[in-house]
Structure formats: structure tokens, C-alpha cells
Image (tube, rainbow, N blue to C red):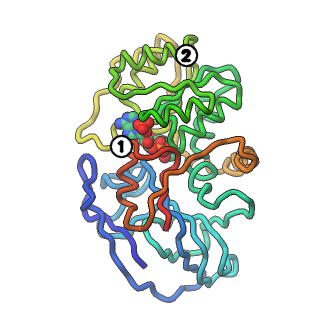
């Protein structure tokens, strides 16, 4: 089996040399274990938090220990009655080609026409995150004016479409022109944040949403948050899903200068971690799977080829290198 380890905890943007590809011979399967050949690996922004050496809501990666992450693969050997050779499963043994794990805790994929890697994106953790933040945290309702940052990413692109499907007016913030064009094709008002000050971004949001913002789905922080705060309507709700703008910061970033807008607009801002809401995953799947299968919800993937591309795929998340879900295909 080949797997990645982290050689040290980075300060700032991780250097490519911090990721080491190692090889090991796997032991025989213990009782209850299965061996899985991974087809798809997920790289996600939250993994940067696991490289800080500090415990947040998930343990840091151990130095010199196999890294982990979402993955989809096929059982090639089984020592557990629940899984047989040929079964496809979703699991956390990513950043490697062959995973050996207890069968307990692996999620068999349902048999349907949806491509298996969708269970790392639109029908997996990022999709569930979009649904949770929009519905359970921001309590988005029909007619709301909704703003989403990192709107063309894995989480953001589902959040904008779920809000559109509710009959909301939706503005999406993204970088590159092709991302803005995709958002526009989804019926979203696209707004670029690139080369803009918070004030300029705020003006652009106002043009795109003249009736203000009732729900802000926050993925970025920085000038996106500052711009959003100044366009809030009374009683607005902000779901704080992530703040990718600060994940590689070498020192704490200053807060937005206009946080007092929360007081003036009597707005509510709430962070959340999707894992705490996992008991609702079946409800999410029931609602969203038929729409994905019927092609009513669009999702894009950016695919890098080969295990060796995993660190680069991860690092590209911080440079806007992905549209939709960033994946590694083995
Ligand atoms: P994305 O697919 O959205 O990929 C990251 C995107 O963020 C990039 O493509 C880029 O798009 C944008 N971005 C990166 N750096 C910056 C920056 N400095 N300023 C503005 N935009 C930037 O990732 P995910 O959909 O997987 O995750 C989105 C957010 O959701 C992240 O903040 C993540 O941490 C969070 N998250 C939170 C969870 C929770 O439980 N709370 C669970 C899962 C995700 P662009 O080209 O537009 O700049």
C-alpha cells in the first residue's frame, strides 16, 4: 500500500515537500477487517485544520502517520460478513491507494445510476454541509435574498441551487470568469471578489441583490464577510460554514470592521460542524438523490489523476483551482 504522511506541521501555505509518499506491506486481515482498493480520494479545505497540530473539532494528523480523508473504493478482500468482495464503500481511508479498515463504520454505496464519486461531493459530506447550513442553521425560506461565498465550490454550488429551488433570489461570489459563467447558467447572480476591496464587493452585491441579504452562507471570511455584513437586512441569518481565506494565515486575521451591523440589523450569525448533524443525512439523501439522478441539480468535478497528485489537488483548493468538487482519481 502507498500512502501519504505529513512530515511537519506547516505555518502558512503548506509546502509540497511536507507531504511524503511512503510504502508499506499490509498485514493479514484481522477479524472484522476489509481491504479496499480506492477509486477516488477526496481533498477538502478542512484538512488544513488537521495540519495545524492543534485539536479543533477533529484530531490533527500525526507526524509520520498515514493521513486520512474521504474516499470511495471497492472491497478486494473481506474478513467480515457484512461486506463482500466487489462491494463499493465510502470511508475515511483516503490519501492512499489500498486501505485496510474495520468493516464497522464503512458506508456501503447504494445501487443506483449516480456515479460513485458523487458520494464524496454532491451526495456526500460537502452536499450534506450545504443542506445543513442552508436549512438547519440559516433557516432559509422561500423568497429570501441569499448570498453564498465560494459559490462555485463543492459546498457552495449545492447551496446556491438548493436556495434557487426554494424560490430564493441568489447571489454567488466566486473568482474566475468561467466559474461566474457557470453560476449564471444556474440562475445565480454572479459576483467576482477578485481585485476588489470590501467596499467594492459590497457595492457589487448591492447591484446584484438590490433588496439586501436575508441569508449569508459563509465559506470564505475576509472581505466577503465584511461586504456581506454591510448588505444585511433586518433579521438576517449568517451560517458560518467555513473561512477558507484565513486557513493559511500565518498570524490571526483582524475581524471585520463592521461587525456592529449584526446589532443594527438584529442579525444572527452561527457556526456549525456538519458531523454534529449527521443523523439528518438520510433526510438529505432522500431529498437530494432523486434530483441529482434526474439531472435537476448540477454538479461539477475537478479531477486530478493518480495518487501522486493528491498534495497538489489539496493545495489547489486554496488557489481556486477547482470548480465543484476537487477529486483524485486512482
Ligand atoms: P470548495 O470546493 O469551495 O473549494 C475551495 C474554494 O474556495 C476555491 O475553489 C476558491 O474558489 C475559494 N477560495 C479559496 N481561497 C479563497 C480566498 N482566499 N478568498 C476567496 N475564495 C477563496 O471547497 P468546499 O466546498 O469543500 O468547502 C467550502 C467551505 O466549506 C470551506 O470553507 C470549508 O472549510 C467549509 N466546510 C465546512 C464544513 C463544516 O462542517 N462546517 C464541512 C465542509 C466544508 P474561487 O475561485 O471562487 O476563489
Q: Quadrant of residue 297?
A: top right
The kind of secondary structure element at disc 1 is: helix
Residue of label 2: 209
Quarter in which the N terminus is drawn: bottom left
| In the image, the residue with mark 1 has its CB under 8 Å from the nearest atom of ligand 1 | yes
Q: Give 51 or 120, whichever is nearer the viewer.
A: 120
Q: Residue at x 43, y 65 (%)?
A: 95
Q: Residue at x 70, y 25 (%)?
A: 167
How many numbered discs, if any?
A: 2
Q: Position of residue 90 (x, y in %)?
A: 59, 64
Along the horizontal axis of the image, is 98 left or right of 19?
right
Q: Give 239 or 54, whichever is nearer the viewer.
A: 239
Residue 272's disc number? none
Q: Give 217 or 260, whichever is nearer the viewer.
A: 217
Q: Position of residue 82 (x, y in %)?
A: 69, 76
Residue 319's disc number? 1
Q: Residues within 10 Å of mark 1 (few under 14, many from 20)?
A: few
Amino acid at each position: 500500500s502507498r500512502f501519504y504522511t505529513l512530515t511537519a506541521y506547516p505555518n502558512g501555505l503548506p509546502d509540497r515537500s511536507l507531504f511524503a509518499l511512503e510504502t508499506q506491506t499490509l498485514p493479514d486481515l484481522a477479524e472484522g477487517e476489509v481491504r479496499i482498493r480506492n477509486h477516488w480520494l477526496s481533498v477538502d479545505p478542512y484538512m488544513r485544520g488537521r495540519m495545524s497540530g492543534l485539536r479543533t473539532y477533529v484530531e490533527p494528523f500525526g507526524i509520520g502517520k498515514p493521513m486520512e480523508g474521504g474516499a470511495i473504493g471497492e472491497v478486494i478482500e473481506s474478513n467480515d460478513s457484512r461486506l463482500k468482495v466487489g462491494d463499493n464503500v465510502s470511508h475515511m481511508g483516503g490519501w492512499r491507494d489500498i486501505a485496510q479498515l474495520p468493516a464497522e463504520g464503512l458506508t456501503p454505496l447504494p445501487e443506483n445510476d449516480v456515479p460513485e464519486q458523487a458520494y464524496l461531493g454532491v451526495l456526500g459530506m460537502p452536499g450534506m454541509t450545504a443542506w445543513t447550513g442552508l436549512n438547519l442553521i440559516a433557516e432559509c425560506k422561500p423568497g429570501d435574498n441569499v448570498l453564498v461565498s465560494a459559490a462555485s465550490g463543492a459546498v457552495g454550488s449545492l447551496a446556491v441551487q438548493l436556495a434557487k429551488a426554494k424560490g430564493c433570489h441568489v447571489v454567488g461570489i466566486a473568482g474566475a470568469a468561467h466559474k461566474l459563467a457557470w453560476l449564471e447558467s444556474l440562475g445565480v447572480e454572479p459576483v467576482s471578489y477578485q481585485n476588489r476591496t470590501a467596499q467594492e464587493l459590497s457595492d457589487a452585491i448591492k447591484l446584484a441583490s438590490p433588496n439586501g441579504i436575508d441569508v449569508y452562507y459563509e465559506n470564505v471570511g475576509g472581505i466577503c464577510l465584511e461586504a456581506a455584513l454591510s448588505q444585511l437586512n433586518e433579521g438576517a441569518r449568517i451560517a458560518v460554514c467555513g473561512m477558507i481565506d484565513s486557513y493559511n494565515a500565518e498570524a490571526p486575521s483582524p475581524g471585520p470592521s463592521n461587525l456592529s451591523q449584526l446589532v443594527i440589523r438584529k442579525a444572527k450569525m452561527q457556526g456549525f460542524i456538519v458531523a454534529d448533524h449527521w443523523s439528518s443525512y438520510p433526510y438529505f439523501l432522500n431529498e437530494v438523490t432523486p434530483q441529482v439522478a434526474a439531472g435537476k441539480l448540477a454538479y461539477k468535478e475537478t479531477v486530478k489523476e493518480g495518487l501522486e497528485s493528491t498534495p497538489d489537488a489539496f493545495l489547489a483548493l486554496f488557489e481556486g483551482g477547482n470548480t465543484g468538487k476537487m477529486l483524485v482519481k486512482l
